[in-house]
Image (cartoon, rainbow, N blue to C red):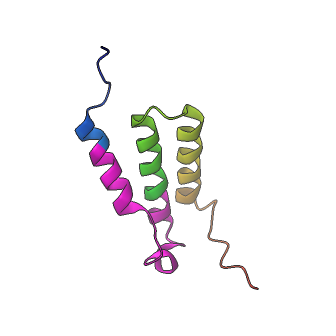
Amino acid sequence: MTKQKWSTKTKDLAKELHSELTLNHKNWHQLKSDSDCRAAELLSGALLQLLQQGKRSDVEALSIQAIKWLKGELKDPGCPHR
């Protein structure tokens, strides 16, 4: 039996944090343009991927996207018009 790198408690806490930071149907319109909220959501997703032994490329992509939000390189494109 191999020793787990991350405890179950650590993974559960990361899941809970990501759940708290994820934008949803209740707060999407209020927070979709907030770069700090978007970056936090992406970084928590990257952390969760890392702890769950996800692909490093996914962890890197989420982290890079979060940094772009923080730098102001990404902005909310707005809702598409029908």
Q: Does the magenta run of residues contain 29?
A: yes
Q: Quadrant of the N terminus?
A: top left
Question: Which residue sits furthest top?
Answer: 1
Above or below residue 6? Residue 78 is below
Pick the quarter of the image with the C terminus.
bottom right
Residue in the image at 27% along x and 39% along y: 10
Q: Is residue 13 above or below residue 22?
A: above
Is 47 placed above or below 39 here?
A: above
Q: How many marks?
A: 0
Percent position (x, y) of residue 74?
Answer: 63, 62
Quadrant in which residue 2 is drawn: top left
Q: Residue at x 56, y 59 (%)?
A: 69
**Does the stretch in magenta take in 60?**
no
| Residue most extreme to the left | 9
Residue 26 lies, with reference to residue 15, above or below; the image says: below
Q: Which residues are magenta?
A: 12-39
Rendered location of residue 78, percent (x, y): 65, 77
- State the residue lying farthest toward the bottom: 82
In screen coordinates, is 9 left or right of 38?
left
At a point 52% along the width and 39% down the height, the residue shown is 59
Quarter of the rendering containing residue 8: top left
Q: Main secondary structure of the magenta part?
A: helix
> In the image, residue 67 lies at what x, y percent?
54, 51
> Horizontally, is 69 left or right of 36 in the view?
right
- 45 and 2: which is toward the camera: 2
- Which residue: 31% across, 40% down? 11
Who is closer to the viewer here, 3 or 68? 3
Tell me where residue 33 appears, x and y as whole percent.
54, 73
